[in-house]
Amino acid sequence: MRSLDSFPRISLGLFPTPIHRLDNISSFVGTNVYIKRDDLCGLALGGNKIRKLEFLLADAKEQGAELVFTTGGAQSNHAMLTAAAAGKLGMKCILILKKRGVTACRGNQLLEKLMGTEVHFLDTDDYADIYAEMDRVGKSLGMTYYKIPCGGSNALGSLGYVSCAREIRDQGFRPDALICAEGSGGTMAGLALGAKLFLPGTRVHGMMVDTDPFDRITPELMRAAAGLLEADLEISSADFTLRDMCGPGYAIPSPEGNTAVSLMASQEGIFLDPVYTGKAFAGLLAMAKEGAFRPEDKVLFLHSGGAGGLFAVDMD
Ligand SMILES: Cc1ncc(COP(=O)(O)O)c(C=O)c1O
């Protein structure tokens, strides 16, 4: 198997991120709940995209790119973090965003304005249109450019979360269950593959916050990332579980998600977001209520960031 450390990687965040026990939440749900603080990884407002960007932007640099494109919805955390990382590395970044969600100067749009990021909105739901627009703009500027897919969720980006699983092992932590939000798939696929490699005995649960076919996407991405690592593994849907926590729709807050955000804030002084982590944490609470965890279990919740969304999306 090829070592994770053999891939080009640029340090962008402060790793390892802390893991700590949530005492009040643990009493509330009747098991040991811990949190992995990827919201505290240092760049911009933190979040899961930094680990992916360490691999993706290193690849961009290797390919001689001067300009980076990425995409997502108007309030994409990934897009904002890509702009922050590119700026830190002295690369130009242009965001070609879907004209969906809150386009006003709030949340991540405000942060992009503060960074002076060039943002184009495209009125489409088809990513093919977006990638064609990236080619058009890139060629018109005559610069060498690199296209990062939505959410940074390709095989290379997923290695960021394979490496997170290794980091958890290196922190001496062996969770029985590992829970994360799944929005474009790379985080979940990386963790599920990483658990197979470094955390045997840990069950990875993905909380779906969008309506894409993650039962197909997750193993596909796991296989592609395992291919990069030249890891000879049998990958199947038995390697993870998925739960639909999307509620009324992607980026539309759900009542359960909002309750989970408030519970975490009031009991632990930690802020989740209404689009990803709040819904994912609501999934953890629902599993606990159904008796999915034993009192002695260690359940690790990934705080994947998203604070920008908290200040953009209306939670009433
Ligand atoms: C805060 C936050 N958490 C979780 C996710 C989901 O991660 P992934 O896109 O890798 O499925 C995202 C994706 O945009 C995110 O911004």
Image (tube, rainbow, N blue to C red):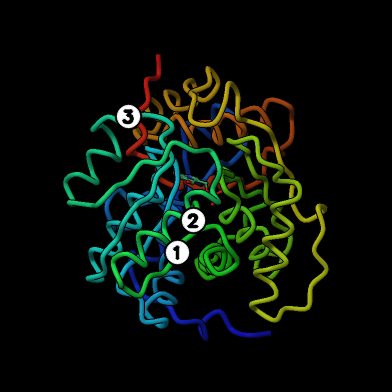
The structure residue drawn at horizontal position 67% and vertical position 58%, both measured from the top left corner, is: 192
Q: Residue at x 58, y 41 (%)?
A: 32
On residue 147, which mark appears? Answer: 1
- Distance from the alpha carbon under mark 1 to that under mark 3: 26 Å
Residue 40 location, x and y as percent? 34, 52
Q: Provide the secondary structure element on which disc 1 rests.
A: strand
Q: Classify 106 as above or below 48.
A: above
* Label 1 vs 3, first from the N-terminus: 1
Q: Are marks 1 and 3 in contact (CB under 8 Å)?
A: no
Compared with 221, 106 (above or below) is above
Instruction: Determine crowd level at label 1: few under 14, some 14-19, many 20+ residues with C-alpha closer than 10 A.
Output: some
Q: Which residue is mark 2?
A: 131
List the residue tagged with mark 3. 312
Amino acid identity at mark 1: Lys
Out of 48 and 14, give the one closest to the viewer: 48
Give the numbered dot on residue 75. Answer: none
Residue at 70% from the left image edge and 52% from the top image edge? 217
Front residue of this view, candidates 123 and 272: 123
Q: Secondary structure at mark 3?
A: loop
Q: Nearer the viewer, residue 113 or 239?
A: 113
- Amino acid type, label 2: Tyr
Which quadrant of the view contains residue 65?
bottom left
The answer to whether residue 21 is left or right of residue 291 is left
Would you say 24 lies left or right of 110 here?
right
Q: Amino acid at mark 3?
A: Ala
Query: Mark 1 or mark 2: which comes first in sequence?
Result: 2
Indicate which disc, 2 or 3, sits on the residue closer to the N terminus: 2
Left or right placement of residue 295 versus residue 264 in this view: right
Rate crowding at label 3 as few (under 14), some (14 to 19) or many (20 or more) other CA atoms within 10 Å.
Answer: many
**Is label 1 or label 2 in front?**
2
Contact (CB < 8 A) between labels 1 and 2?
yes
